[in-house]
């Protein structure tokens, strides 16, 4: 993580660079648009370490909005809540244009793929509530990425709230 912080500060010019545990959660300040930062960071990681990893960015305001939009907030136990952050809204095309086929993919997601588990696609996030935890569920990141033709990264609800708390102290 120290090398990642150095890469971001020294080579990419991000400021206020911090990480949270060895999980790929990275905080930084930048003057560029988030999608440009994501592309630059992805390319820099590939060039430095040879890893082709997904890079998905959100601002503090966007993280708060994700938390506030939780469709499962009426359930008191957040132990098995997760959110998958997508690189783009799955209802639009890669270039940001309206895309009927992309919108249809969201509508065609099988709500019965994992009985007892539920999900909601809201904007660039997929909210998931697992009946018995995510370990055995068929609602996996790989399945969502394949079905929606997007790139994503998932965090449990506790981590999301911790990320918000850390970002608020910057």
Image (cartoon, helix red, strand yellow):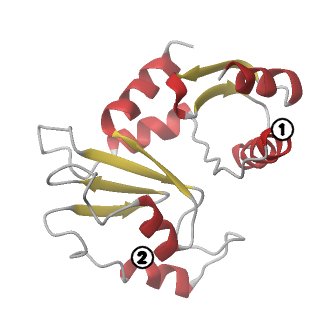
Density class for disc 2 (Cα within 10 Å; few <14, some 14-19, many ≥20) is: some
Give the residue at mark 1.
48
What is the x, y in percent for residue 99?
59, 82
Residue drawn where x is 50% and y is 57% of the image:
124
What is the x, y in percent for residue 158?
32, 31
CB under 8 Å between discs 1 and 2: no
Front position in the image: 11 or 22: 22
* Quadrant containing the N terminus in the rendered view: top right
Front position in the image: 44 or 67: 44
Q: Earlier in the sequence, mark 1 or mark 2?
A: 1
Residue drawn where x is 13% and y is 64% of the image:
116
Give the residue at mark 2.
106
Residue 74's label in the rendered image is none
Front position in the image: 107 or 159: 159
**Quarter of the image where one finds residue 127:** bottom left
Q: In the drawing, does residue 134 fall left or right of residue 99?
A: left
Disc 1 element: helix
């Amino acid at each position: 993580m120290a090398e990642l912080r150095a890469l971001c500060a020294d080579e990419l010019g991000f400021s206020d660079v911090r990480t949270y545990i060895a999980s790929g959660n990275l905080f930084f300040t930048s003057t560029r648009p988030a999608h440009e930062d994501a592309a630059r960071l992805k390319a820099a990681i590939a060039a430095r370490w040879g890893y082709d990893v997904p890079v998905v960015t959100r601002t503090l305001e966007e993280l708060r909005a994700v938390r506030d939009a939780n469709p499962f907030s009426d359930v008191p136990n957040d132990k098995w809540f997760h959110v998958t952050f997508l690189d783009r809204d799955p209802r639009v095309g890669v270039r940001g244009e309206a895309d009927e086929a992309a919108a249809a993919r969201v509508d065609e997601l099988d709500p019965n793929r994992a009985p007892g588990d539920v999900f909601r696609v809201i904007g660039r996030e997929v909210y998931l509530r697992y009946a018995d935890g995510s370990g055995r569920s068929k609602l996996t990141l790989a399945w969502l990425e394949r079905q929606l033709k997007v790139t994503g990264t998932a965090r449990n609800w506790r981590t999301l709230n911790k990320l918000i708390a850390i970002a608020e102290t910057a």
